[in-house]
Image (tube, rainbow, N blue to C red):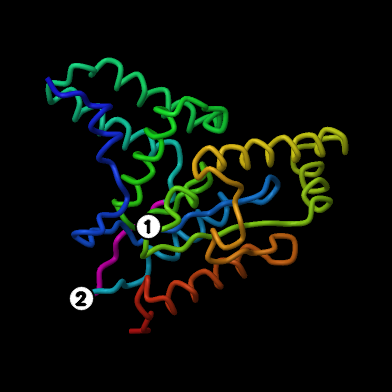
């Protein structure tokens, strides 16, 4: 009987250099704690859905930002594939997928240290990228998909003091609570990226970095749209 985890972890790749089979188009959004990537992702998904894409005929295909529901849907698809075939490790594989799904939903994904779980996450992220027209927020997706073409890796940053003040406002924290929250969240995310790529994240891991403290959401969205158009990830928009 076939072994699902063994074949999955061995063969799952985001890019097939021999066939030129690439996923996309897609976006990833990485952020420091205190920067609202979710708001940017939702606005981008709505605007990009209204654009025509690189095709001879106009197609209005939905861009989706990857929330826990979409992630769970991909996990469930994989579980169905396992159940439809005969794998000697089916039970173990399903448990792995469900654990990654739960960790994604409540953000304990950054606490995962088991290498098989990490590889399982990378495989699911790759599958989401292959679906195309997806916006993947956090979960080290930018690092996982760094070398894949036909995408834009975005990073949101802001000065530490600005982020502390923002968390004090939106979460009604004391300065000490906000400081500890920011430091701990950044530390967890940085450590997880190291698990993924074996080193700390660097500026050149991202295509564009925005200062979230000095830009409005709509300004960031407009800039991203223009970059996507100039890179021909989406087609030029023509008024009818």
Badge 1 marks a residue whose secondary structure is loop
Q: Position of residue 222 (x, y in %)?
A: 55, 72
The residue under the point 84% across, 51% down is 161
Q: What stretch is highlighted in magenta?
A: 56-64
User: Is 36 placed left or right of 49 in the picture?
Assistant: right
Q: Residue 29 carries which label?
A: none
Q: How many numbered callouts?
A: 2
Main SS class of the magenta portion in the image: loop
Residue closest to the eye, 20 or 174: 20
Q: Position of residue 137 (x, y in %)?
A: 51, 48
Residue closest to the eye, 206 or 45: 206
The residue under the point 66% across, 49% down is 32
User: Is 36 placed left or right of 143 in the picture?
Assistant: right
The residue under the point 37% across, 67% down is 50
Badge 2 marks a residue whose secondary structure is loop
* Distance CA(mark 1)–CA(mark 2): 18 Å
Instruction: From the image, tell me which residue sits under label 2.
Output: 57
Q: Using the rendered view, name the quadrant where residue 118 is placed.
A: top left
Residue closest to the eye, 147 or 176: 147
Q: Using the rendered view, name the quadrant where residue 68 is placed.
A: top left
Q: Using the rendered view, name the quadrant where residue 69 is placed.
A: top left
The residue under the point 55% across, 43% down is 193
User: Is 73 placed left or right of 2 in the picture?
Assistant: right
Q: Position of residue 147 (x, y in %)?
A: 41, 58
Q: Residue 63 carries which label?
A: 1
Q: In the rendered view, tell whether residue 201 sits above or below residue 209.
A: above
The answer to whether residue 195 is magenta is no
Q: Which quadrant would the N terminus be assigned to in this image?
A: top left
N-term-proximal mark, 1 vs 2:
2
- Which residue sits furthest right? 175
């Amino acid at each position: 009987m076939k072994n699902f985890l063994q074949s999955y972890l061995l063969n799952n790749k985001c890019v097939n250099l021999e066939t030129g089979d690439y996923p996309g188009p897609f976006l990833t959004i990485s952020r420091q704690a205190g920067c609202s990537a979710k708001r940017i992702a939702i606005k981008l998904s709505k605007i990009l859905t209204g654009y025509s894409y690189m095709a001879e005929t106009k197609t209005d295909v939905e861009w989706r930002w990857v929330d826990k529901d979409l992630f769970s849907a991909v996990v469930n698809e994989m579980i169905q594939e396992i159940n439809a075939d005969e794998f000697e490790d089916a039970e173990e594989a399903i448990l792995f997928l469900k654990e990654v799904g739960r960790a994604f939903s409540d953000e304990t994904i950054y606490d995962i240290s088991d290498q098989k779980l990490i590889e399982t996450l990378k495989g699911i992220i790759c599958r989401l990228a292959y679906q195309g027209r997806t916006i993947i927020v956090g979960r080290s997706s930018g690092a996982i998909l760094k070398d894949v073409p036909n995408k834009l890796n975005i990073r949101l940053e802001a000065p530490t003091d600005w982020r502390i003040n923002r968390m004090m406002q939106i979460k009604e924290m004391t300065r000490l609570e906000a400081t500890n929250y920011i430091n701990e969240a950044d530390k967890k995310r940085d450590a997880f990226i190291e698990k993924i790529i074996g080193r700390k994240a660097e500026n050149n891991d991202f295509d564009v970095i925005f200062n979230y403290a000095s830009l409005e959401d709509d300004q960031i969205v407009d800039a991203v749209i223009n970059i996507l158009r100039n890179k021909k990830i989406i087609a030029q928009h023509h008024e009818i």
